[in-house]
Amino acid sequence: MLQGLQTARGVMRSLGVYYRDRGRAEAMDRLYSQFVNPGDLVFDIGSHVGDRIAAFRRLDARVVAVEPQPALVRTLRLLYALSSGVTIEPKAVGRKAGTIAMQINIANPTVSTASGAFVDAAHGAAGWEGQAWDKSIEVPVTTLDALIAAQGTPTFIKIDVEGFEAEALAGLTRPVAALSFEFTTIQRDVARACIERCVALGYARFNAALGESQTLGEWRSTDAMLAWLTALPHSANSGDVYARLA
């Protein structure tokens, strides 16, 4: 009972954070309009409470929303079940299909993760004080290749899976026009692995938006992007790297 109330509070907190700011939503639309056109298919990997789904739908794109946390899947269905342009997949995404243990942060579900290394990196790190992963559940895992086979090839893939981004990209063998993945300064090695995977897939140009700024900087080569990540101060905390084909 208590855990259920804590879960509900965590979801409500996320809804407030991610839906309340109209200026943030407008900035998100401007950002994603650089990659997404009306009628395009988009994969939202790690949908959380669906604020990116809302942005993609405002751009008139079709969305495959992939989210493994049961409480968040219920939330997404409440918000988007009546939208014919949204398909919800209650799964994690990794390098191969199967199941995996998901570490749930009940009070802050946005940082729940399938990566034990992410939890280890967060413990004791500045800016991550008070975070606790207090529940573990088994969730099904699919791959980006399997999603493409079932749903079609997207124009854009957004990946935000709390330290599991490189595992998600390992399950993609065919590049799409553009993609993004979240990075954190507590796991720069994961971001480097993601860039290496992107290069192997044929991506040649990279950009980044810090935090929730929804603002890109300059497009960089692979080496320049790696140098930029290395030079970031720890306090930058997180952001998203964008990759596109040459």
Image (cartoon, rainbow, N blue to C red):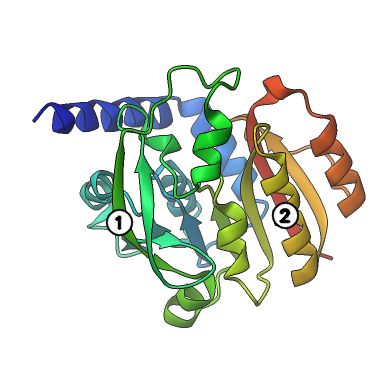
- In depth, the one of 237 and 64 nearer the eye is 237
- In depth, the one of 207 and 190 nearer the eye is 190
**Amino acid type, callout 1:** Glu
Residue 179's image quarter?
A: bottom right
Q: Is residue 108 visible?
A: yes
Residue under the image location 48 percent in, 56 percent down: 45
Q: Is residue 134 left or right of residue 157?
A: left
Task: Characterize the local packing of mark 2: few (<14), some (14-19) or many (20 or more) Cα atoms within 10 angstroms.
Answer: some
Residue that badge 1 annotates: 138
Distance between the alpha carbons at the discs numbered 2 and 1: 25 Å
Estimate the x, y position of residue 221 in percent, counting from the top left. 90, 52
* Residue projecting furthest to the bottom: 149
Residue 138's image quarter?
A: bottom left
State yes or no: discs 2 and 1 in contact (Cβ < 8 Å): no
Residue under the image location 37 percent in, 49 percent down: 102
Q: Secondary structure at mark 2?
A: helix
Q: Is residue 203 left or right of residue 180?
A: right
Residue under the image location 52 percent in, 26 percent down: 123
Q: Is residue 36 visible?
A: no
Q: Quadrant of the N terminus?
A: top left
Q: Is residue 178 above or below residue 53?
A: below
Q: Is residue 171 left or right of residue 49?
A: right
Q: Secondary structure at mark 1?
A: strand
In primary-sequence order, the first of circles 2 and 1 is 1
**Amino acid type, callout 2:** Ala
Residue that badge 2 annotates: 193
Estimate the x, y position of residue 39 in percent, counting from the top left. 50, 67
Residue 238's image quarter?
A: top right
Estimate the x, y position of residue 225 in percent, counting from the top left. 84, 45
Residue under the image location 62 percent in, 35 percent down: 214
